[in-house]
Amino acid sequence: PSPGANPSTLPPAILAQRYRLERRLAQGGMAEVWLGTDISLSRQVAVKLLKPALAADPIVAERFRREAIAVAQLSHPNIVAVYDAVGDTIGGETRQAVVMQLVNGKSLRQLLDEQKRLSPDLTMHIGQCVAAALECAHHANLVHRDIKPGNILIDEHGSVKLTDMGLAKGPADMTLTRDGATVGTPQYISPEQARNPQDVDVRTDLYSLGATLYHMATGVPPFRGDTMADLIIKVLNATPTPPNEVNPALSQGLSLVLRKLLAK
């Protein structure tokens, strides 16, 4: 749970007669994440609620549900588990929700905000965990498409978990994005994903993992720009500064791995 999260904007509600919404933890362009209680099993969960305008669209709602079903098939210690997908009406509005494992801890984004960069050993450990999670997803023909520090969680015991498969591209490409929408996060997006977010394969996740590891190891993303257009042009055309030149403490081996991951 994030300290200082926005207060509740919904009336007290119980989804599908089972999940009580407690307070909102975070929100994005398409969904909100709430702290919830599974009344049946007496445990806390995270509830991802699709925003009302999207939930009212039957095509979008069905895509949201199918994505949840696809991710629920994944069973891996480094992937946040999906428990349920439900629909209900709250305050007169149709809502679609995905119920997930609650991870008590912080995101890699928060960790980088606090420490700027991580040690090479910790960078490699987190990278290995995320790579293992991606291997599991890729074997199931799921491409995450939004690997970034904010989607990597580290719990209170130090376990690393990949979350937010909301942009995942499945076998039938039932992807929760609107035509023409940008998919992914520009600092970590691959060149091919910047060109056409619908026409990517598992390699786009490896590039984004490399960009995330580069940030962890050096304290900065591989590319920065004064404008979004400037940033995207660099992603498409520029070569990042070798990571061991940004941080001389990095070994040649780790620097080579990051450069290979970030190859166009």
Image (cartoon, rainbow, N blue to C red):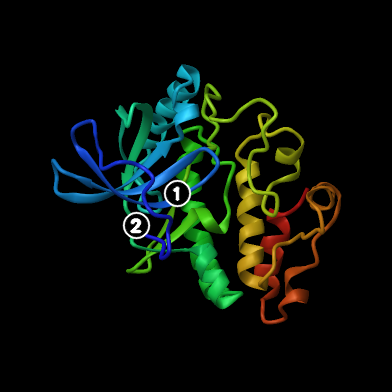
For the point 49% across and 67% down, the residue is 125
Look at the image and tell me whether residue 96 can be seen.
yes
Q: Which residue is mark 1?
A: 163
Q: Secondary structure at mark 2?
A: loop
Q: How many marks?
A: 2
Where residue 118 appears, as percent x and y from the top left, is 57, 75
Identity of the residue furthest to the bottom in this view = 249
Looking at the image, which residue is at 58% across and 54% down?
Answer: 148
Q: Is residue 88 above or below residue 2?
A: above
Q: Pointer 1 and pointer 2: residues touching (CB < 8 Å)?
A: yes
Relative placement, left or right, of 94 versus 12 is right
Q: What number is the disc on residue 103?
A: 2
Report the amino acid beneath label 1.
Answer: Thr
Q: Nearer the viewer, residue 30 or 239?
A: 30
Residue 73 position by quadrant: top left
At label 1, counting other C-alpha atoms closer than 10 Å, the crowd grade (few under 14, some 14-19, many 20 or more) is: many
Q: Residues within 10 Å of mark 2 (few under 14, many from 20)?
A: many
